[in-house]
Image (cartoon, helix red, strand yellow):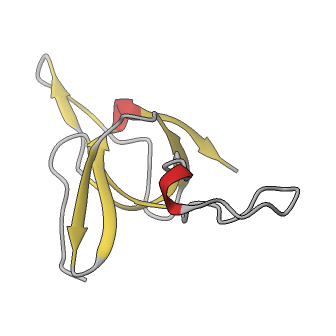
């Protein structure tokens, strides 16, 4: 995979795979699959500056996160589906 370093308060996330079947065993066709809203942080920026003060990132590589349905920009790099978004688009860390 190509090396990408997000700038400022941006985060690079690899979305989880969309579910293929429901809990009752029904197979979901490709046209009806929901985009996943979970993923794993692949890379983080160095943080942002506000009024001359650097605000550090609260996320780190490897964190499992939840993000908004329409958050970020989808990227396809070397066949990998990735998303880049601001840290503020992350709703929470899954533990």
Provide residue 43's location: percent of width, then percent of height.
Answer: 32, 62
Q: Residue at x 84, y 56 (%)?
A: 23
Residue placed most toward the observer, 78 or 35: 35
Is residue 78 left or right of 60 when viewed as pictured?
left
Residue placed most toward the observer, 42 or 50: 42
Provide residue 20's location: percent of width, then percent of height.
Answer: 65, 66
- Picture layout, residue 86 above or below residue 36: above
Is residue 62 left or right of 95 when viewed as pictured?
left
Residue placed most toward the observer, 27 or 46: 27
Quadrant for the N terminus in the image:
bottom left
- Image quarter of residue 22: bottom right
Is residue 92 left or right of 41 when viewed as pictured?
right
Q: How many marks?
A: 0
Q: Residue at x 36, y 30 (%)?
A: 88
Residue sitting farthest toward the left: 52
Q: Residue at x 24, y 40 (%)?
A: 9
- Picture layout, residue 52 above or below residue 4: above
């Amino acid at each position: 995979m190509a090396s990408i370093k997000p700038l400022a308060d941006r985060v690079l996330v690899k979305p989880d795979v969309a579910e293929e079947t429901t809990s009752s065993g029904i197979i979901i066709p490709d046209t009806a699959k929901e985009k996943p809203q979970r993923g794993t942080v692949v890379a983080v920026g160095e943080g942002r500056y506000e009024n001359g003060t650097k605000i550090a990132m609260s996320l780190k590589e490897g964190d499992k996160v939840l993000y908004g349905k329409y958050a970020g920009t989808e990227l396809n790099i070397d066949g990998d589906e990735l998303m880049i978004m601001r840290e503020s688009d992350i709703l929470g860390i899954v533990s």
